[in-house]
Image (spheres, helix red, strand yellow):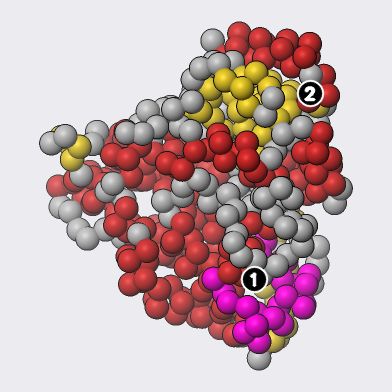
């Protein structure tokens, strides 16, 4: 039982290193919108690379705050497994339904088998072929937004990853609003029950589409997943549906929140906006720096498969270990002056898209979409002025903005 293991971890941490235990609950969504959070997290990281966090929903969890230890966890799937959950919020001792069946909840070699049918759709080569249409879509979105003038920028940027994902899945136009609405609930619901309810609405739709494509395959991601064979056998339909659910929700929400948070950063920093607009820095390096700076996927979760030492702490078999990507990506041991936004930062080995076996399968597509959105904003709008306060969501899965009201002035 995880409860026994975490109790052991609690006792160990209390008796050997009281300074590494903290009353700060990093899983509190309200924490990440506070202006003092960067200083708070930086101080915790200075104190120790690994802390014991007593969470409300998940019990005791080891929180990894430094880059080196975070990379160690993410690289070593044999010791730090994803099968018992890759995200906090499921509840103490609970294992997600898709354990061992989804890309996000498997370890190699099974993980590689599940990625294989999706790889062609997200490879750099495949994305390069779609780059022009992605850029055109982004331009059209900002043409309409500039014409309208007063808009919610979150809504504007959300439309691109949804449209691209629906294209990959060949989702009919009439179903697309439903898909994004359900994605919101599945990823941003305030409770585990709400998030499960969102997935439960999306899954029957995907199941229906998988059944159709298995009998009548097309040139799309659903068809590829539905007809792919491992060891000469088709993947179980349930596994296909679970993986598609994960791809849809992750593909839409990660880009949505990174784009909105990135534009919010640029609006607050006109000097950075001008550098990009005048071509003083490349868009590729700017995208990576804004990924590092926002790190909207605040954390990723692993479970120790054996007793191991990490950052001077004794981690026991069954203990849950949360890598706080946001903190690792601001570690001064890994990044020079990490609290500065350097759009030309190089090298930039941020962890915003993961590391190791679970490096984001959609990374090339996500970068292409972000580049297209930032480029379209720079090309179409001379000025983006906030017309009201931003509203942060309450999520530690993809932290971002629910609302960003602005007025766009055309160039």
| Residue 410 placement (x, y as % from top left) | 66, 88
Foreground residue among 4 and 89: 4
| Residue 161 placement (x, y as % from top left) | 48, 62
| Residue 25 placement (x, y as % from top left) | 76, 31
Q: Is residue 291 above or below residue 210?
A: below
The residue where tag 2 is placed is 21
Q: Is residue 120 above or below residue 194?
A: below
Marks 1 and 2: in contact by CB < 8 Å?
no
Look at the magenta stretch and give its main secondary structure. Answer: helix
Element on which disc 2 rests:
strand
The answer to whether residue 269 is magenta is: yes
Residue depicted at x 62% and y 36% = 69
Residue depicted at x 20% and y 58% = 218
Residue depicted at x 20% and y 37% = 230
Give the residues drawn in magenta, as a range. Answer: 256-284
Q: Which mark is residue 7?
A: none
Instruction: Count the numbered circles shown.
Output: 2
The answer to whether residue 254 is magenta is: no
Q: Which mark is residue 344?
A: 1
Compared across the picture, whether 294 is left or right of 226 comes to right
| Residue 166 visible within the image | no
Label 2 and label 1: CA atoms lie apart by: 37 Å
| Residue 179 placement (x, y as % from top left) | 45, 53
């Amino acid at each position: 039982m995880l409860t026994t293991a975490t109790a052991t971890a609690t006792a160990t941490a209390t008796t050997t290193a009281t300074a590494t235990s903290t009353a700060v609950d990093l899983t509190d969504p309200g924490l990440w919108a506070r202006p003092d959070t960067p200083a708070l997290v930086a101080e915790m990281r200075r104190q120790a690379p690994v802390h014991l966090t007593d969470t409300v929903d998940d019990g005791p969890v080891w929180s990894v705050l430094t880059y080196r230890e975070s990379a160690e966890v993410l690289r070593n799937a044999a010791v730090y497994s994803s099968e018992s959950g890759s995200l906090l919020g499921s509840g103490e001792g609970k294992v997600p339904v898709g354990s061992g069946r989804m890309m996000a909840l498997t370890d190699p070699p099974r993980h590689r088998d599940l990625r294989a049918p999706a790889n062609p759709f997200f490879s750099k080569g495949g994305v390069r072929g779609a780059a022009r249409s992605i850029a055109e879509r982004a331009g059209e979105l900002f043409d309409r937004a500039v014409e309208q003038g007063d808009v919610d920028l979150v809504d504007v940027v959300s439309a691109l990853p949804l449209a691209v994902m629906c294209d990959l899945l060949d989702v009919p136009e009439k179903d697309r609003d439903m898909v994004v609405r359900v994605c919101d609930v599945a990823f941003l619901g305030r409770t585990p029950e709400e998030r499960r309810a969102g997935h439960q609405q999306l899954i029957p739709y995907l199941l229906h589409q998988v059944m159709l494509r298995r009998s009548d395959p097309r040139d799309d991601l659903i068809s590829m997943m539905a007809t792919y064979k491992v060891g000469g056998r088709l993947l179980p339909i349930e596994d296909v549906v679970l993986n598609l659910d994960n791809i849809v929700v992750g593909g839409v929400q990660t880009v949505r929140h990174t784009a909105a948070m990135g534009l919010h950063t640029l609006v607050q920093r006109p000097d950075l906006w001008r550098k990009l607009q005048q071509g003083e820095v490349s868009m590729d390096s700017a995208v990576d720096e804004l990924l590092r700076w926002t790190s909207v996927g605040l954390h990723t979760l692993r479970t120790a498969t054996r007793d191991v030492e990490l950052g001077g702490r004794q981690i026991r078999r069954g203990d849950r270990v949360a890598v706080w990507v946001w903190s690792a990506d601001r570690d001064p041991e890994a990044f020079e002056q990490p609290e500065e936004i350097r759009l030309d930062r190089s090298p930039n080995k941020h962890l915003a898209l993961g590391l190791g076996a679970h490096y984001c399968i959609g990374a090339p597509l996500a970068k292409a979409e972000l580049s297209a959105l930032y480029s379209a904003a720079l090309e179409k709008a001379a000025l983006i002025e906030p017309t009201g306060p931003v509203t942060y969501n309450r999520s530690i899965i993809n932290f971002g903005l629910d609302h960003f009201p602005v007025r766009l002035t055309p160039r």
